[in-house]
Image (cartoon, grey):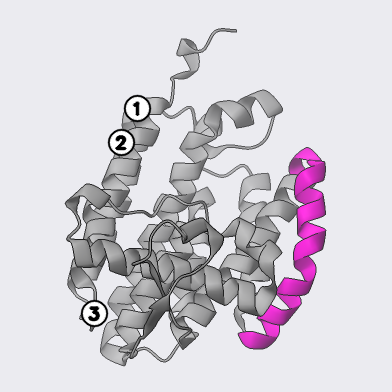
Amino acid sequence: MFGYVTTVESELKVREARSYASWYCGLCQCMRRRYGRFSTLFLQYDCAFLALLFSGELGETVDAKACRCLHRCHDPQRKYRLETPALAFAAAVNVMLSYYKCLDDWQDERNLIKGAAALLLKGAVRKAALDQPGLLELTKAYADEQRFAERDGGGVDKAADPTGQYLSAMADLLPFPEKERLPLKWLLYNLGRWIYLMDAWDDRQKDKKKGVFNPYVAAGYSKEQAAFGLYASLEEAKKAFDLLSPTRDRGLMENVLTLGCAQRTRQVLEDGKEDGDEPV
C-alpha cells in the first residue's frame, strides 16, 4: 500500500482529528513494540485507516494513552490507541506489504536500498506471520498474482484486480459480523483497486523512463480515462461503506473516503503530465 488514504484535516472536527492522530500513533507504537523500530520507517496512512475501519466493524473497546515519543513531544495532548486485535492485524499487514514492496523494487530495478530494506524486514515478517496466521500466505499469493498480472501485460483492470482481491480477502481473516462482511469486502476491493491505480498513475512517467511495466503506459490511457476509473472505484467504495454500521468514528471514516481520497485523486491527476507534455 502506498499512503494515499488520508483525511482532509481542515474538514474534521477537533475530536475527529485527535482520534485519527491517535490511530496513526497507535499503529506506530504497535509496530515498534512487535516488530522493532526499523519497521516504523514504513508506517502507512493506508494501514492506519484499515485499523480504524476494522476496529469499528469489530466493535472493539479502545483506550488511549499519552504519546511521549520524540516526534510528538511538541503536542502534549497527542495520544495513541492501545493495542487491539484490529491494530495488531493492521501492523502485520503494514510490515508484510512493506517487505514485498521493497523486494519488488529490488527485483525490478535492482535498487540496493530497497534490497537491503527487504533483508532487514525479513525477521519482522516472520514474527508477523506467527501473530496473524493466514496473512502471510495471503500476502505471498497477492504478490505472486500481482507480478503475474504485470508480466502478462494485461489491461488496467486486470493489473488492479490483485490488490483489490487482496484487501477484500482480509475480511475473511477477522471475525466480522456476517451481515457486514459482504459490503466490507466490496469496500475493500474497490479501495484496493483505487490504491493500485493511484500509484500507477503517479509513477507513470518514472516507470516509462525505467522500462518498468505500467498499465496506463501499456494501454495508452489519457488523463480523462484514468480519472473515470479512479472516481468509479471511489464511488463504489463509498456505496459499500454506506451499508456498514461501524460502532465508532463513522464521521472520520466518511471524511477519508468522501473527501480525503477524492482530494488525493485530484492532486495526483493534476500533478501528472500527459506523455506529450514532458520534454524529451
Q: Main secondary structure of the magenta part?
A: helix
What is the distance, in whole Å, between disc 1 and disc 2 at their CAs?
Answer: 6 Å
Q: Quadrant of residue 67?
A: bottom left
Q: Quadrant of residue 66?
A: bottom left
What is the distance, in whole Å, between disc 3 and disc 2 at their CAs?
Answer: 28 Å
* Image vertical order of residue 57 relative to residue 270, above or below: below
Amino acid tagged 1:
Glu
Q: Residue furthest top?
A: 280
Q: Which residue has dot 2 on it?
A: 266
* Viewer-closest of 251 and 83: 83
Q: Classify residue 260 as left or right of residue 44.
A: left
SS at circle 1: helix
What is the distance, in whole Å, between disc 3 and disc 1 at their CAs?
Answer: 34 Å
Q: Residue at x 41, y 80 (%)?
A: 65
Magenta span of residues: 108-133
Q: Which residue has dot 3 on it?
A: 248
Amino acid tagged 3:
Arg
Q: Do the residues bearing badges 1 and 2 touch, measured as CB atoms within 8 Å?
A: yes
Asked if one can make out residue 120 in the rendered structure from this viewpoint, the answer is yes
Q: Which residue has dot 1 on it?
A: 270
* Viewer-closest of 121 and 108: 121
Q: Classify residue 20 as left or right of residue 244.
A: right
Find residue 39 and report its horizontal and vertical position in percent: 66, 64
User: Which comes sooner in the sequence, label 3 or label 2?
Assistant: 3
Amino acid tagged 2:
Arg
Give the mark toward the camera: 3 or 2.
3
